[in-house]
Amino acid sequence: MTSKQRAYLKSLASKEDTILQIGKEALTPENTASIEEALEARELIKVGILQNCLDDIHSIAQTAADRTRSQLVQVIGRKFVLYREGKGDKKKIELPAEKKRA
């Protein structure tokens, strides 16, 4: 993902509401399944981490991205944004094209 594409996704995510929250149990299989379903439906999601979760936010975000085969767009405060391109006709977000190198 290029920096231009990442910036585009960040601008889209800034308008989105947090749709999932992770609590004191950190990243459970149930949370992972919920993130998976949300990515399937939306492509771009914002996840919040509650104050009672004592685990490192960056490691939770990266683990969630790894488990769902998505890309971590950003971590800001106690929230993180994940993106996974939709398949076929389910694709909703069109990323800016990458520059071709000579």
Image (cartoon, rainbow, N blue to C red):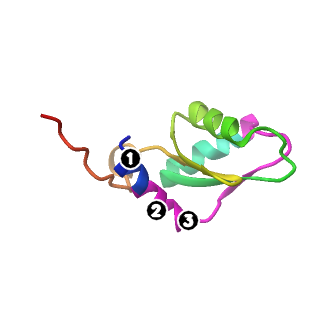
Mark 2, Cα crowd under 10 Å, few <14 / some 14-19 / many 20+, is few
Residue 84: percent from the left, percent from the top?
Answer: 47, 43
Closer to the camera: disc 1 or disc 3? 1
Residue type for callout 2:
Leu
**Disc 1: which residue:** 3
| Circle nearer the N terminus (1, 2) | 1
Q: Residue 16 carries which label?
A: 3
Residue 58 vs residue 41, the one in the foreground: 58
In the image, 42: left or right of 101? right
Residue 53 figure quarter? top right
Image: magenta residue range: 8-30
Secondary structure of the residue carrying tag 2 is helix
**Disc 2: which residue:** 12
Secondary structure of the residue carrying tag 3 is loop
| Circle nearer the N terminus (1, 3) | 1
Residue 8: percent from the left, percent from the top?
Answer: 40, 57
Residue type for callout 3:
Glu
Residue type for callout 1:
Ser
Look at the numbered discs 3 and 2 and tell me whether their residues touch, using CB distance below 8 Å: yes
Residue at x-position 38% and y-position 43%: 87
In the image, 30: left or right of 84? right
Secondary structure of the residue carrying tag 1 is helix
Mark 1, Cα crowd under 10 Å, few <14 / some 14-19 / many 20+, is few
